[in-house]
Image: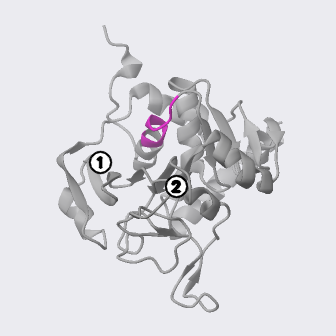
Amino acid sequence: MTHAGSQPADDYTIDELMAVCIARQVQDGEILAHGMATPLVAAGYILAQRTHASHAYFASAIGQGVVRDWAPLSITRAETLWLGKALTHVSFVVIAADLLRAFAPKEFFRPAQIDSSGNFNNVAIGSSYERPRLRLPGVAGIPDVSVHSSQMYLYVPRHSRAVFVPRVDWITGLGHHPDRQEGSGPRYLVSDLGQFDWYDGRMRLITVHRGVSIQRIMAKTGFDLAVAAHVQETPAPTREQIRLLREEIDPLGVRRLETLAGAARRDLMRAILEQEAALDTRD
């Protein structure tokens, strides 16, 4: 008899599916690194630890700490988890010089631009660095990781031709190149439309999300995309995975902020902050 929680869920949102896809890439015992404003990744990591990877460790850019415990996602209380529950804190120099090579953490990055080889850009949009059309958040440790890591994974909450481009304006994350001596470029990418890998150094579509066609993905990608021989629909989350995300890991819906833009994102941000203020009052 199949447990009800292990049955596929019918009612799920794209942010929940992406979090589940991220969780599926995690293996037990891994060190999982993530950035400061990546709630989708954090939700996926915690989901993996709560299900099949109970021995996973989190390496957070918030406080540069290593964490074994978890807490529900939050905006105003994020430091309570990543700083308050950390087992240890280390300097960025130690991370880049020692820990990256020794422990090979798995990390999900969110590229602002990416090409078919997996080169990606997080510093500026436009040919002039001094006067770009758009200044991006910056590279942080991406150059240090991408030159040698074989555990580099990517996610794109809003798939478009503005992100998937023929040529990135600036290379801040190194992709697949025949003459590379170390590392192997990104291994995997999940977007709100499907899942991808790199076959012979070229980005390839491997599954499509529910209700999405291959033609739609091709139209929203700014380069010729390779397609696997037998592309199937991305497996649905289980009922238990959805319950964990909604009731325990992220009841405020912080993960949804990454899939929204404009007024919708602003309204959700305000609603979350109001709920957190109410929690602070009760505490």
Q: Residue at x 45, y 67 (%)?
A: 119
Q: Toward the viewer: 271 or 152?
A: 152
Q: CA distance from mark 2 to mark 1?
A: 33 Å
Q: Nearer the viewer, mark 2 or mark 1?
A: 2
Side (left or right) of 138 relative to 170: right
Crowding around mark 1 (Cα neighbors within 10 Å: few <14, some 14 to 19, many 20+) is many
Q: Quadrant of residue 239?
A: top left
The quarter in which the C terminus is drawn is top right
Q: Toward the viewer: 84 or 117?
A: 117
| Badge 1 element | loop
Image height of 218 relative to 90, above or below: below
- Which coloring applies here? one colour
The amino acid type, in three-letter code, at marker 2 is: Glu
Q: Quadrant of residue 106?
A: top right
Side (left or right) of 31 relative to 16: right
Q: Residue at x 38, y 21 (%)?
A: 6
Q: Toward the viewer: 118 or 162?
A: 118
Q: Is residue 84 visible?
A: no
Sequence-wise first label, 2 or 1: 2
Residue 164 horizontal/vertical position (percent):
38, 69
Q: Is residue 262 visible?
A: yes
Residue 259 is a magenta residue: no
| Badge 2 element | loop
Toward the top, the furthest residue is: 1
Q: Which residue is mark 2?
A: 182
Residue 97 horizontal/vertical position (percent):
73, 53
Q: Which residues are magenta?
A: 21-27
Q: Residue at x 52, y 24 (%)?
A: 51
The quarter in which the N terminus is drawn is top left
The amino acid type, in three-letter code, at marker 1 is: His
Residue 25 is a magenta residue: yes
Q: Which residue is mark 1?
A: 209
